[in-house]
Amino acid sequence: MATIQPVVLFFILGVLAGVIKSDLKIPEALYKSLSIFLLVAIGFKGGVSMAKYDIMQVLPIAISMVVLSALVPLLAYPILKYVGKFSKADSGAIAAHYGSVSAVTFAVGLALLHELNQYYEGYMALIMALMEIPALVTGTILARAGVASASGEKTPWGKLLHEILTGTSLVLLIGGVFIGYYAGVTDNVAPLDKMYMDLFMGVLALFLLEMGLLASARLSAVREKGLFLMVFGVAFPIAAAVFGTYVGWLFELSAGGTMLLAVLYASCSYIAAPAAMRIAVPEADPALSIGASLGITFPFNIFLGVPLYWEMSKWIHNIT
């Protein structure tokens, strides 16, 4: 099993700082700047790598991944509602979080592959950007169907879709992919590679420090819901990663690409999803969904999940 990456130890530092109530804080402006950098860098690096592929080679798997990602909330919702006994609104909102993806977890997966010097398909960054959207819509439909308002209120679909499609993460990821693709095709990567490739790990370390501080603040919400939320926050991502591993092997991705697909299915959103659910399902308690995604699943994924998904990917490729 791969050792823990030094970069994720910054997450532990952030959690410890929060637990001991240190006055350590990342300024809001810097946090937003780090987010912007990471999203653009992931997209740019993916676009540069994608320039090596024929677009018709990428299209079938991209469409398949988008369709399949929309199904994830359909599996999470009944577990949350009937086993976890959450309300329909909370079940739909949490399911949407777990169906959507985390760019930072994806970045940790990239960092591991870089450390192991493993190849992966560059177009995975584009697939990540596309996978953010469908699950949010599915989760909203599930939640709104349950809440379908005693008050007669309708879901503001226009506003919701605008929020999703024009959200910061999606705009920067897809924009970065296209710019990176253009730079790769025109062989003009050099002016930007120092910025977006060489500095990537250092910026990721600072961002994980802030994620640790945020996660420590969500521990109380996790404790209130107890054992079920903790079990779901670990077991569901593992099951989703098994599915992602199988799909990656089915589409004949490399071991690195298969691992990244497993990471995407196992990850959950704590940036795009909360913003979308705030508009779509105001009845849902954001402390539950963010507490589960950021307080349980994110730490599990970056410490144990990502190395586990790499082992799963190696295993399925070795036996076949």
Image: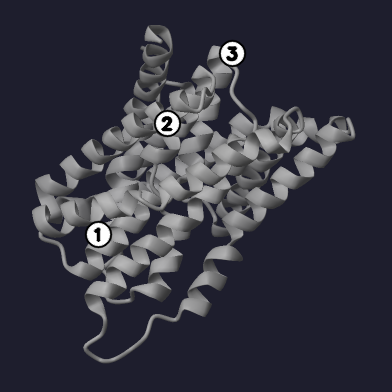
Inspect this view and state whether residue 303 appears: yes
Q: From the viewer's perspective, is residue 310 above or below residue 21?
A: above
Can residue 7 be seen by looking at this rendering?
no
Relative to 15, say whether 314 is above or below: above
Q: Closer to the N terminus: mark 1 or mark 2?
A: 2
Q: Residue beneath label 2, please?
A: 247
Task: Tell me what residue is drawn at x 36 percent, y 46 percent.
Answer: 22
- Point out the frontmost of discs 1 and 2: 2
Distance from disc 3 to disc 1, alpha carbons, whole Å, reads 38 Å
Q: Position of residue 193 (x, y in %)?
A: 78, 31
User: Which quarter of the figure is the N terminus placed in?
Assistant: top left
Q: Residue at x 26, y 85 (%)?
A: 149
Q: Amino acid at mark 2?
A: Val
* Amino acid on which disc 1 is placed: Leu
Q: Residues within 10 Å of mark 3 (few under 14, many from 20)?
A: few
Amino acid identity at mark 3: Asn
Q: CA distance from mark 1 to mark 2?
A: 30 Å
- Circle nearer the N terminus (3, 2): 3
Residue beneath disc 3: 117
Residue corresponding to mark 1: 288
In the picture, residue 128 is in which quadrant?
Answer: top right
Label count reads 3
